[in-house]
């Protein structure tokens, strides 16, 4: 018997090696050719979650930290920038120190009808980045009648629901009896709470709003004047136009009051940074009405920031 019959020949070994190398090469090549045949299913729930994170856990860009010790007075947060070109991201968070607490100013700007186009929302919520699928969306916050985005979502969408708190700035005052004056002390030195910016008002970044709801039995009233004075000198009147809105559906900017017959309500809003030029710690806001029949009474009130308002944010993506 030939003693070399059990030994593989060199030709077979080389051929087998070439075959295996070719097989591995072809297998790798075929795998790449099949990439285009893979499923293109999109996890819309994941995109809805990502969008909710931007809205609820991000203050947006540009932003200002309300806890900054010496902020640059020229810096602006995105809700203070008129041109959307200067806005990079539309986050609603008040501060990164308080996840889930939304800024009322950012919420009002975000949900204001006609403020942004759908394309501007998409670009600033990372829903239409270059090379990505252009998502349709609808975002709704409880308490706001008009959602933003597309008006008719399909039955099946990606969906995310988040419980949030909204930081508001309006203090209601109910007027049940005729008065000559409603005097509202604005403690500018104290509205920034010792518990932090979340429980106070940063007058550089946030407004102060007062809403007077008048009992129908008291109406009509004649509002003669609205003015500001120092707390210790009620006869020294600051020469300012006070931003008063007469009636719940009225619009307009600041104007001087002469005589207005009140048949509904009164709303007053001091915009952010309104009091930057005041050197006093407190001011008193006076609403002067036509004197009622005796006995004449006045209403004394001190402005306090309202509590956080619970709300629900819903995001639909398709």
Image: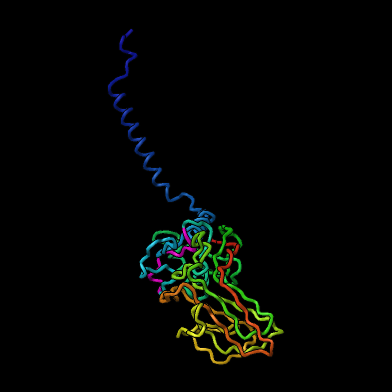
**Residue found at the far bottom of this picture:** 259
Residue at 53% from the left image edge and 58% from the top image edge: 100
Q: Position of residue 80 (x, y in %)?
A: 43, 72
**Residue 276 to residue 3: above or below:** below
Q: Position of residue 171 (x, y in %)?
A: 58, 72
**Residue found at the far right of this picture:** 217
Write down the quadrant of residue 308 in the picture. Answer: bottom right
Q: Position of residue 312 (x, y in %)?
A: 59, 62
Can residue 113 be seen by looking at this rendering?
A: yes
**Residue 250 to residue 80: above or below:** below
Can residue 47 be seen by looking at this rendering?
A: no
**Residue found at the far left of this picture:** 10
Q: Is residue 171 magenta?
A: no
Residue 165 vs residue 60, the one in the foreground: 165
Which stretch is magenta? 83-95
Residue 256 vs residue 43, the one in the foreground: 256
Q: Is residue 85 magenta?
A: yes
Q: Quadrant of the N terminus?
A: top left
Chief secondary structure of the magenta portion:
loop
**Residue 126 to residue 220: above or below:** above
**Residue found at the far front of this picture:** 232
């Amino acid at each position: 018997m030939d003693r070399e019959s059990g030994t593989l020949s060199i030709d077979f070994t080389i051929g087998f090696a070439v075959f295996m190398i070719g097989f591995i090469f072809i297998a790798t090549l075929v795998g790449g050719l099949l990439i285009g045949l893979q499923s293109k299913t999109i996890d819309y729930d994941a995109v809805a979650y990502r969008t909710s994170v931007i809205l609820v856990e991000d203050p947006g860009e540009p932003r200002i930290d309300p806890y900054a010790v010496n902020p640059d007075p020229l810096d602006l947060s995105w809700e203070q920038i008129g041109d959307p070109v200067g806005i990079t991201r539309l986050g609603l968070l008040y501060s990164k120190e308080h996840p889930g607490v939304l800024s009322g100013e950012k919420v009002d700007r975000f949900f204001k009808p006609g403020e942004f186009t759908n394309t501007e929302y998409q670009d600033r919520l990372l829903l239409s980045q270059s090379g990505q699928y252009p998502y349709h969306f609808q975002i709704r916050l409880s308490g706001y009648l008009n959602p933003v985005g597309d008006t008719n979502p399909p039955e099946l969408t990606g969906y995310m629901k988040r419980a949030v708190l909204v930081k508001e700035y309006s203090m209601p005052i109910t007027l049940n009896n005729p008065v000559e004056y409603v005097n509202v002390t604005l403690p500018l030195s104290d509205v920034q709470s010792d518990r932090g910016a979340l429980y106070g008002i940063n007058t550089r970044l946030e407004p102060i709003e007062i809403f007077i709801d008048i009992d129908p039995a008291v109406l009509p009233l004649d509002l003669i004047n609205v003015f500001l004075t120092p707390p210790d000198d009620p006869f020294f009147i600051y020469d300012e136009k006070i931003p008063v809105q007469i009636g719940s559906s009225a619009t307009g900017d600041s104007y001087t009051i002469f005589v207005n017959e009140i048949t509904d309500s009164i709303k007053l809003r001091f915009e952010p940074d309104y009091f930057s030029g005041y050197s006093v710690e407190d001011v008193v806001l006076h609403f002067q009405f036509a004197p009622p029949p005796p006995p004449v009474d006045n209403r004394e009130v001190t402005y306090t920031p309202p509590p956080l308002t619970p709300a629900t944010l819903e995001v639909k993506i398709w």
